[in-house]
Amino acid sequence: MTKKADLSINFCGVKFENPFCLSSSPVGNHAEMCSRAYDAGWGGIVYKTLGLEKSFKVVMPSPRLSVYNYGNKKFVGLQNAEQITDRPIKDNIRDIALLKKNYPNKILISSIMGYTDEDWSELAKMSEDAGADILELNFSCPQMAHKSAGHRVGQDFHAVAAFTEVVKKSSKLPVIAKMTPNITDMIPVAIAAKEGGADAISAINTIKAITDIDINNFTPLPNIHGHSAATGFSGPSVKPVAMRFVSDLYNSKDLNLPISAIGGIETWIDALHFLLLGATNLQVTTGILRYGYRIVEDMIEGLSDFMIERNIKSLNEIIGKATEKIVDPSEFTTRYQVISVIDEEKCIGCGQCYISCQDGANQAIKFDPKTRKASVDEERCVGCLLCKHVCPVWDCISYKEVDTKNAKHAAIF
Amino acid sequence: MKKNINIGKIKQFKSMRESLSLQDAIREANRCLLCYDAPCSKACPAGTDPAKFIRQIKFYNFKGAARTIRNNNILGGVCAHICPVEKLCEQKCSILALENPIDISGLQRFASEYGEKFGIEPLVKHKSNDNKIAVIGAGPAGIGCASVLAKKGYQVTIFEKENAGGGVLRWNIPEFRLPKVALERDFNNLLDIGVTVKYNTNIDSEDAIQSLMKNGYKAIFIATGLSEAFRMDLFYNFSNAIDYISFLRTIKIKNGNEALVNKNVAIIGGGSVAIDSAVSAKACGAKKVYLISLEHLGELPADQEEIDLARKMNIIFKSGSQITGLVSDKNQITQIKGKEIEWMEPEKFIPENARQIKGTEFNLNVDLVVQAIGTKPGKEILKFSTGLKTFGKGILVVNENFETNIPGIFAGGDISNGGSTVVQAVGEGKKAAENIHIFLG
């Protein structure tokens, strides 16, 4: 029998069988979908954000998706103009209750978005009564067709603090405040949420972006009857930005709250990256939009195998381990210098390293036109590793440390 | 990924492969490593520069790719269909160390077709100088040479014995390999840059050559190819034994040949043209098509892809076999008799080295015999070559500058290399043009 590692986590005092959750989006739109997600192995679900139709009637724009493609690779990022749920609140509350009845050991997080104090309070109570385990406050949807909701709230830390406080007073449930990345510094907003009583922070919501323009009619996409907007961007492209924000949150001593990470997670390695940056809980939408709920199987099995190989008993042992190594660039040790090493056996002779080094680095690669082999001019190499990154063979180019006291090195004058 | 061969299209006398779609082309170009000093480009005899046009496709500069192809190789669209890329550019592709080579011919065809479809500007005539050059034969070598000279400003006239240009491209390469539209597109480019073609004009005597010289032609480029097929003595007097040149020509012109329907056809030979003939016969509706060759299956000179195609078309391979006799009725062959052979010495694939094996006799009932056993220069060469040095079957002797022993007379393509690829002929034509330019100072 396959050995399985313990992937369980405790997040906001709630035990999850694994840290993998659906984030608030169409992937958690109703009970039937959520049931299939639970069955596939997801540890938790953030149900699609609830609102009150009496305050604002949601109508979805159409079409509402556009993708960012790179070369022949489609869908490296996704732009959406999706709104919060457009289903009647009573249907959603009934679905949440049904899910908790059928899946008592799985976690259900109710995402809510109000427009007034009363809305927030009512949504929190309704969710708690239906059996939700946690509340997530959506302060961050970047494309709400309503002037005083979504990320406009999330950019205003007074509003964040006030609404969080209202929710905390209305419900006993733990509260996650979901942050917008459409802000220079996330920490003050996260701290405002903490002051309002938030138990955890989730980040990032989508990044306001424009993915594409139809060059035939000069209209950005999605083309919503002749108009478009900068709306939420997600998927693998945003992962580096999400990682930066998660590490900022984890590194903030003033904040010191558990983090649920969101942003481009598709594989167990993506998941591990966020855990290492300080996340306890993980949320996914775009990966599911693209590949379906089934991807969680590989996240679970992959992360489990990694833990067994490394003898990691609990995810708590690794949470934040990479963030500890993130410092201000002023603290780098600049006496440490490296140079590239090319494995001639593995070199296939394409010369991309040569071109990139010539035009983008320090002209430190030599290319033999007869043998078609690249080699490093060690006196010129500054160890930027551009060559390594353009090489089509993964393990052809590596690097070694140079003795900057004795050897001549181009970066040391 | 190369598009698969579609046998249904072969039977309709249409290109056997689909063009790459825009999606296919972008995907394929994105696999390219964009090598430094790219080996694919160095491997192209005609200097088409695939590395550049693939880069242009990758960066969505599709018309730029079309320009690169036609500027570097006036028959670039044609070569995209028929070039043996597996032995040239694709064989040198760096990515072979990691995965399948880039579909260079597919991308070349895509770009050429894209240029035409989206209205690439026509080529223009270059400012001409007063030097007149005569090119004999509007086949690949002649076209290649004429294109370079015209761009340099020479007044180039091609003398073509047929009523249309292209040589083997027009008359002998089956439609499923090379659609006429591809030749027309490239040939129109040649006319656009100001090359004059005189059709139905035979240059087949010493006088004709002399008269060109007298009429102010400063140099002559002979590119008459190998226009005459070898025939076997055994079949000499029979009206239903023909050579592959006339056989393929009829099918190419008529897009089929009803006379072949339900007939049994024996093709003699084991090279590419033998396979083309066999596949064409089958496409025309022939009942049984035999491919009789001395070489055994693994020894055939045809490419593997051609052999695979012939097998898919249910061609019956009588490989490793020798014809020993025939049965005839008046001047018609009705039966071919043969025996299997073995080689006395290894790796020496000539009739003298074959030993017939007892007990392997076979008789094939045939309605038509097509001989595809090689070609030689046409008779016209003998007539104007009293002073020109030749060797072997009448191949012209040229030096490294493609110059014959007579100053001012150059030659290239099959007539001087003894028979090679179209892309090789274009390359030789281009190089000869550069040398003619130097010759004329």
Image (cartoon, coloured by chain):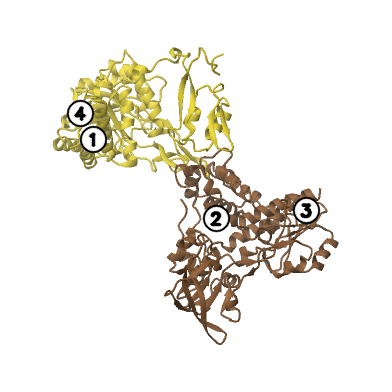
- Local crowd size for mark 1, using a 10 Å CA cut-off: few (<14), some (14–19), many (≥20): many
Q: Mark 4 and 1 residues: CB-CB less than 8 Å, in contact? A: no
- The local secondary structure at tag 4 comes to loop
As displayed, is residue B25 above or below residue B255?
Answer: above
Of circles 3 and 1, the one toward us is 3
Q: Looking at the picture, do discs 4 and 2 lie on one chain?
A: no
Identify the residue at horizontal 33%, vertical 31% (top origin).
A269
Which amino acid type is shown beneath numbered disc 3?
Answer: Tyr
Residue at mark 3: B154
Residue at mark 1: A42
- Local crowd size for mark 3, using a 10 Å CA cut-off: few (<14), some (14–19), many (≥20): many
Q: Give the CA separation, mark 2 to mark 3.
A: 32 Å
Which amino acid type is shown beneath numbered disc 4?
Answer: Asp
Residue at mark 2: B84
Chain assignment, label 1: A
Please give the letter of the chain rendered in yellow.
A
Chain assignment, label 3: B
Please give the letter of the chain rendered in brown.
B
Q: Nearer the viewer, residue B338 or A322?
A: B338
Quadrant of the image occupied by residue A240? top left
- Left or right? Give the position of A251 relative to B414: left
Horizontal and vertical percent for residue A332? 44, 14
Q: Give the CA separation, mark 1 to mark 2.
A: 53 Å
Chain assignment, label 2: B
Q: Give the CA separation, mark 4 to mark 2.
A: 58 Å
- The local secondary structure at tag 1 comes to loop
- Left or right? Give the position of A211 relative to B165: left
Which amino acid type is shown beneath numbered disc 2?
Answer: Pro
Which amino acid type is shown beneath numbered disc 1?
Answer: Trp
